[in-house]
Image: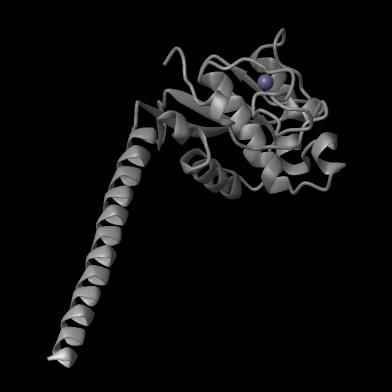
Amino acid sequence: MFESLIGLVAAAEISKAQMEVQTTADAYYVAVQEYTAAKARETAVKYTVTYDISYRGTILSDKDDFARKVESILLDERGWKRAGVAFRKVESGGRMHVILAEGAQVEAASPTVCSPKLSCSVGNLVLINDDRWRGGSDSYNELGVSIERYQEMVLNHEVGHFLGHRHIESCETEAGQAPVMLQQSTGLRGCQPNSWPLPSELWVSGL
Ligand SMILES: [Zn+2]
C-alpha cells in the first residue's frame, strides 16, 4: 500500500514535470512563430527596384567580379533589403543603372555634382569610381579595413542616394558606427567604418 502510494506520487511528479516541459515547448513554439512573423514583417518587400549594370570608360577592375559583388551586396540581409527594397537584376532598362566608371566618366555624368576622384549618384545613375573600387580610400586603408568592406560601403552609400538619402555628417554616438550615408570615403569623422545602413537609416523616399 505504502509502496503503491509512493508510486502514485512519483507518477504524479513525472506527469507534472512532463506538463512543464510541454508548456515550455509550447511557449517556445509560440515565441518562434511570433519571431518569424515579426521578421517577415520587418523584411516585407515594399519596393522592387530593377537594376542593370554597365561600364563607362577604361575599366581596370574585373567586371565579372564587380557584377557578382553588386548582386550579392544588393541582396544581402544586412543591406537596404531591411528597408523593404527588393533589387532585381535585368539585362537593360532597369530603374536604377549601376555603372562602374573611369573617374573622368563619373565627372562627365554631372560635372557640377560629381568628382573624378569619388563615386557619385545622379538621378537613377549609381556611378562607382573604378579607381576607388580597386583601391579603396585612404580613410579605410589607413585602418587596414579590407577592400571588400570598402566596396560594400561605397555601393550601399551610392544606392542610398538613389533611395532618397542625403549625407549624414556625424555618428549617432561618439566613436560609434558610421552611418552608411556619412561620406566615409573622404574621412570617418571619428566614427567606426561601417558598410551597412544603420537601423535609423532604414527608410526610402521618392520611389
Ligand atoms: Zn554621397
Instruction: Name which residue lies at 58% across and 19% down.
Output: 161
Left-right relation of 206 to 179: left
Image quadrant holding the N terminus, namely bottom left
The picture places residue 53, in percent across and down from the top left corner, at: 51, 34
* Residue 15, placed above or below residue 181: below
Tell how many labels. 0
The picture places residue 138, in percent across and down from the top left corner, at: 85, 36
Image quadrant holding the C terminus, namely top left
The picture places residue 178, in percent across and down from the top left corner, at: 71, 30
Q: Residue furthest front?
A: 2
Q: Which residue lies furthest to the left in this view?
A: 1
Look at the image and name its color scheme: one colour
For this rendering, which residue is in front, 82 or 51? 82
Q: Quadrant of ligand 1?
A: top right
**Quadrant of the rendered image containing residue 152:** top right
Instruction: Name which residue lies at 72% across and 25% down.
Output: 171
For this rendering, which residue is in front, 194 or 113? 194
The picture places residue 62, in percent across and down from the top left corner, at: 64, 48
Instruction: Name which residue lies at 70% across and 11% down.
Output: 113
Left-right relation of 117 to 22: right
**Quadrant of the rendered image containing residue 133:** top right
Q: Which residue lies furthest to the top in this view?
A: 112
Instruction: Name which residue lies at 18% across and 86% down.
Output: 7
For this rendering, which residue is in front, 26 or 149? 26
Left-right relation of 28 to 123: left
* Residue 48, placed above or below residue 73: above
